[in-house]
Image: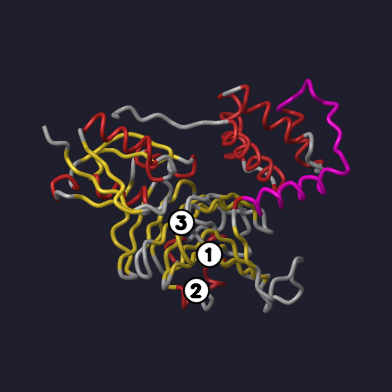
Amino acid sequence: MTNVTKFTSKQIIQEQASLWISRMDRGLSFEEQNKLSIWLNQSDAHKDALFNLAKLWDDLSVLNELSDLFPLENKIKPKRFAPIAMAASFAIIMLSSASFMFDSTFLPFSMKNSEIAQVKYYQTKIGEQVSFSLSDGTSVRLNTNSQVKVAFTDNHRQVSLLNGEARFDVAKDKNRPFSVSVGEKSFTALGTIFNVQKNNLNDSELVVTEGKVLISNTKTINKRLNNIVNSFKSLEHNKLVGSVVNSGEKSHIKNNIPQNTNKISLDQIQRELSWQQGMLIFDATPLNIALSEVSRYNDIHFEFDDENLSKLKISGYFKSGDIETLLQSLSDNLDIHFQKVSENTIQLTVKKV
């Protein structure tokens, strides 16, 4: 259980290819172009997935980008039915993998009145994960048992994380900040990738994997919107009211107060965000904490007959919904006996010699 490997699958490659197509549609930055080249050179499967998806995409900007990546495939022609087909398939996938609720203020097209917000709700059930794109091109991935409220105006892109955890790959728009609020705190970015987890009403966690994120008070962010826009445009982040978290850093919010921001290693980032590949990675993690994380993905609770057993540290990687394999591994490697004492409760005990 000590070997930690990165989980890959055809489904994940397709998701990554879709994300790259979405980025190419809005335009790649120089840094993104380099990252795309690295991703493509990692595997022929990456190239095939991106190329096949591009053939369905009805956008000349994307096809022009791909003409340099696939010089031998210069006869790609956009299919006029592609947007309808992709939209239909996207809707089917979304409705089959998550529950969506729309309130009466939702409007499907861009708003002419900046005072009126386009509001939309997305949520997942226990054990579900889903990815989708917002109207501005931002990519969002919701973890298990999560819910977000999206409210866009002409001046501000506001998302409220009502429950659970989400990753945001924010489309760049220097004139319209993108903020994720959790209780009294907001996390604001203008083009970056970050992960937010809501632990309870007053506690949350932020991991930034690309760019910068500003932590500020939710109540005052609208009053200082112009200041935020101007400060990001001029890159004068020292003038922003709040604390800035950089790429490769993690920040904890406890009782609505930001704690120390720490630089974290690539291995730790992989563990923190392994849920995005449908995996859970533990590294010398106390058993009670590890199983508490497992319970987020299953309607199962664990009991210990010995406090020392709950503090036992484990390492390894597991599929987030595969309790059977996890329990069998605990039994085989640590001599831990498990017994289902009720429909949603499993009791763990140390095997007696």
Kindly check if marks 1 and 3 are in contact, taking CB atoms under 8 A apart as contact.
no
Asked whether, in this view, residue 203 is left or right of residue 276, the answer is left
Could you tell me the amino acid type at mark 2?
Ile
User: Which residue is rendered at x = 60% and y = 50% of the image?
Assistant: 97
Q: Which residues are magenta?
A: 69-96
Tell me if mark 2 has few (under 14), some (14-19) or many (20+) residues whose alpha carbon lies within 10 angstroms of its own: many
Residue receiving disc 2: 221
Of residues 235 and 322, the one nearer the viewer is 322
Q: How much space separates mark 2 and mark 3, taking CA atoms?
A: 22 Å
Q: Position of residue 330 (x, y in %)?
A: 27, 35
Residue receiving disc 1: 179
Of residues 177 and 116, the one nearer the viewer is 116
Question: From the viewer's perspective, is residue 293 above or below residue 147?
Answer: above
Could you tell me the amino acid type at mark 1?
Ser
Q: How much space separates mark 1 and mark 2, taking CA atoms?
A: 9 Å
**Helix, strand or loop status at disc 3:** strand
Of residues 38 and 130, the one nearer the viewer is 130
Q: Quadrant of the C terminus?
A: top left
Q: Earlier in the sequence, mark 2 or mark 3?
A: 3
